[in-house]
Amino acid sequence: MENACLGRSHRSEAGRAKLKELIGLSRKILDVPRDYHLGIVPASDTGAVEMALWSLLGKIPLDILAWESFGQEWVKDVVDELQLVDTRLFKAPYGNLPDLNLVDFSHDVVFLWNGTTSGVRVPNGDWIDSNRTGLTICDATSAVFAMDIPWEKIDVLTYSWQKVLGGEAQHGVIILSPRAIKRLETYQPQRPLPKLFRLTKQGKFNKSIFNGDTINTPSMLCVEDALDALQWAERIGGKSGLIRRSEKNLEAMSQWVEKTQWVDFLAKQPETRSCTSMCLKIVDDWFVSLSSEQQSECVVQVVELLAEEDVAYDIASYRAAPPGLRIWGGATIETTDLQALFSWLDWAYATVKKIWINLR
């Protein structure tokens, strides 16, 4: 990597310059408003979400939405760890969204833009009240850089580098609106905050975190990797180019699913289908007749067969999701590669099905 800042401290002038460059380029590509702050934080998207939950919640009632595994993790944090009693939970099974019309925006609201393990996303931001008095806290880790985020509807947004841009993991990003910063400076939660979660210093918003003074030591190699990805994104048209590539992949997947009898989207409504984490269920009558354990084993064999042929890796559905396939369609994926996969999927499923039928 030319001009890479490796083997140097992140506190050095050169290291700080790289971190500030990463922050600035991220803001530019995402069209983050000038009065919003973007900072690099520890522990990937998980760390960024935890930072928001522990630092901001508890002042007013909370509505929290969950329709897949990671949303359920934030529910567990809120109910079991933070023990916020004035909380309303809106849940939906895999493949569906909760009723968004029931959300009360005089409350704080925690939700995912895109359910990574279900392939279900919110269709847009129209359901979010522009005149809300609570904060909207959005986990957008598999949505940002691939889906259009209306910043005026979001007070806190988090993501991790490794999702849509395909970089190395471990680093998170948190973006705060002026309303979120005001909450930080006017509300002190009655609970201890670990150092990694602290966004204030002596009661004031700690701007230094959002200017490259990270709380912990980031990997400068990962910083270079993220910069390389962002520079590529800029070359292909920035945010609109990234979104266009992901939506093209969803279109290709939709065309294959429509003509394929053994598979369907897990997301029931077309407008909620993810263009990144495209989750599929197997609807073939033979597969449906199997027990859940047998279905899981069948999927494992399909995935292993594809891996043996060096066709695809790690495309089984998330362990807590219904047995099926989860295929990444983010901006780093070429549509032609995705299209080349489809005939292999047909072959692998037909092969495994034939083996099972012969054994029975």
Image (tube, rainbow, N blue to C red):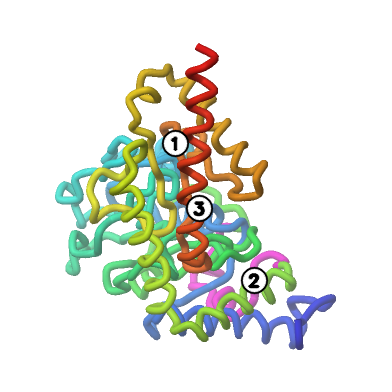
| Front in this rendered view, residue 330 or 139 | 330
Q: Amino acid at mark 2?
A: Thr
**Relative to 93, is 232 above or below?**
below
Q: Nearer the viewer, mark 2 or mark 3?
A: 3
Q: Position of residue 345 (x, y in %)?
A: 48, 44
Residue highlighted by disc 1: 324
Q: Amino acid at mark 1?
A: Gly
Which mark is first along the chain, 2 or 1? 2
Q: Amino acid at mark 3?
A: Leu
Q: Position of residue 178 (x, y in %)?
A: 36, 75
* Start-end of magenta stretch: 197-218
**Relative to 85, is 100 above or below?**
below
Q: Which mark is residue 147?
A: none
Which mark is first along the chain, 1 or 3? 1
Please report contact status of discs 3 and 1: CB closer than 8 Å, yes or no.
Answer: no
Residue 314 visible within the image:
yes
Q: Position of residue 281 (x, y in %)?
A: 38, 37
| Front in this rendered view, residue 146 or 196 | 146
Please, what secondary structure does the residue beneath circle 2 have? loop
Q: Position of residue 257 (x, y in %)?
A: 33, 48
Residue highlighted by disc 2: 214
**Relative to 78, is 157 above or below?**
below
Residue 88 visible within the image:
no
Q: Which mark is residue 341?
A: 3
Q: Residues within 10 Å of mark 1 (few under 14, many from 20)?
A: many
Please, what secondary structure does the residue beneath circle 1 have? strand
Please report contact status of discs 2 and 3: CB closer than 8 Å, yes or no.
Answer: no
